[in-house]
Amino acid sequence: MAAFLARSRCALRAQVAMVCSRAMASKTPVGFVGLGNMGNPMAKNLLKHGYPVIAFDVFPDACKEFQDSGAQIMESPADVAEKADRIITMLPSSPNAIEAYTGPNGILTKVQKGSLLIDSSTIDPVVSKELEKAVEKMGAVFMDAPVSGGVGAARAGNLTFMVGGAEQEFDAVKTLLTCMGSNIFYCGEVGTGQAAKICNNMLLAITMIGTAESMNLGIRLGLEPKLLAKILNMSSGRCWSSDTYNPVPGVMEGVPSANNYQGGFGTTLMTKDLGLAQYSATNTKTPIPLGSLSHQIYRIMCAKGYAQKDFSSVFQFLREEENL
Ligand code: NAD
């Protein structure tokens, strides 16, 4: 049985290698499912690198906007799989990914043998492993490759990708991902990309809340916000949330706090990622007191009307709480 499995994995690898060498020679089409805040600029970067893109999104307006950029739009993920043997998915959460892969019009209903399926959504690592099994049964290969960097990095093509899956496929995946990102890390088996991503976002939530708290306290103590940010950014409190994505309006240009917290990384998505961290921590009996508290704070924010705002709006939330 073990020898049989090893032989069929070898045959699968040979098929994927063939698909990828064909693709490299001629830039054959790449499928893209999920054209939202992140998927849209990522898929546009594939187009810029000369890859024809065959795409689908359940939201018709997202398709229309993308069609105007020169992509071919399909009626379902299944139709994308019929036309492309390398597909990237960029979906909000685990249920959306399950639907797009295994639903009645999902990728797996028409996937070609030897296809390479890369999921860049942030989802539960357990779900990634289940998808891997389902994909392998159809004679294709699944990798998880969630991203860090946000919409700005997606536009600029300098996302960080955290990749999980068979190491032999990493070079093939990297060829595509370098069109959209500048740091591509191999993490280990399927699910480890998600694990790295969840840890990063838990830390991000904690530092964002911490930055918002500190800035708010400093302002209350009479400090001018820009000066306080400058001091923090030259001191040991400095972090990405303080020096690149400051949550206080007026401190920085070109960040969501300068635009009434529009765009960027939604509070709902951060809440989802903290839920994944909480679930993973429970499963592995890992204490995450600050991660758990951050999860509760973001859940309350969602219930109080912040769901669609950028996650840095925790600053505004704290100030409103204070006014109460
Ligand atoms: P988004 O909600 O803007 O876009 C997701 C898109 O997927 C939407 O257009 C939606 O219509 C589409 N969709 C949902 N279900 C579908 C299905 N079954 N088939 C086809 N399309 C479907 O989300 P986003 O901000 O682009 O984030 C995507 C993923 O990337 C999330 O998992 C998020 O956690 C992660 N992420 C986001 C950011 C960010 O800054 N926005 C940064 C890093 C990672």
Image (cartoon, rainbow, N blue to C red):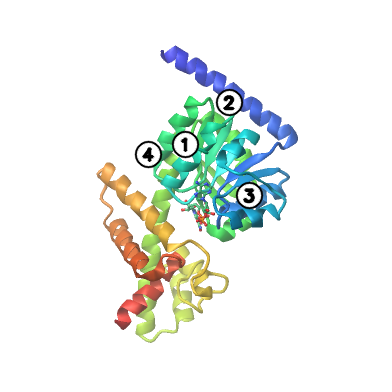
Choose top left, top right, bottom left or bottom right for residue 111: top right
Q: Residue at x 61, y 39 (%)?
A: 80
Q: Alpha carbon of mark 1 to alpha carbon of mark 3: how far?
A: 22 Å
From the image, state whether disc 2 or disc 3 is nearer to you. Answer: 2
Q: In terms of depth relative to the viewer, which is nearer, 202 or 227?
A: 202
Q: Reading the chain from its start, which is encountered first: label 2 or label 1?
A: 1
Q: Residues within 10 Å of mark 4 (few under 14, many from 20)?
A: some
> Element at badge 2?
loop
Q: Residue at x 52, y 38 (%)?
A: 105
Q: Reading the chain from its start, which is encountered first: label 2 or label 3?
A: 3
Q: Where is residue 89 in the image (x, y as percent from the top left)?
A: 54, 44
Q: Reading the chain from its start, which is encountered first: label 4 or label 2?
A: 2
Residue occupied by mark 3:
43
Q: Reading the chain from its start, which is encountered first: label 1 or label 3?
A: 3
Amino acid bearing label 2: Lys
Q: Can residue 37 be seen in this view?
A: yes
Q: Residue at x 49, y 73 (%)?
A: 257
Q: Is residue 282 above or below residue 264?
A: above
Q: Reading the chain from its start, which is encountered first: label 4 or label 3?
A: 3
Q: Where is residue 207 in the image (x, y as percent from the top left)?
A: 39, 63
Q: Alpha carbon of mark 2 to alpha carbon of mark 3: how far?
A: 23 Å
From the image, state whether disc 4 or disc 2 is nearer to you. Answer: 2
Q: Residues within 10 Å of mark 1 (few under 14, many from 20)?
A: some
Q: Alpha carbon of mark 4 to alpha carbon of mark 3: how far?
A: 26 Å
Q: Is residue 8 left or right of residue 319?
A: right
Residue occupied by mark 4:
126
> Element at badge 3?
helix
Do callouts 1 and 3 mark residues in contact (Cβ within 8 Å)? no
Residue occupied by mark 1:
102
Q: In this view, does 268 lie to the left or right of 322?
A: right
Q: Reading the chain from its start, which is encountered first: label 4 or label 1?
A: 1
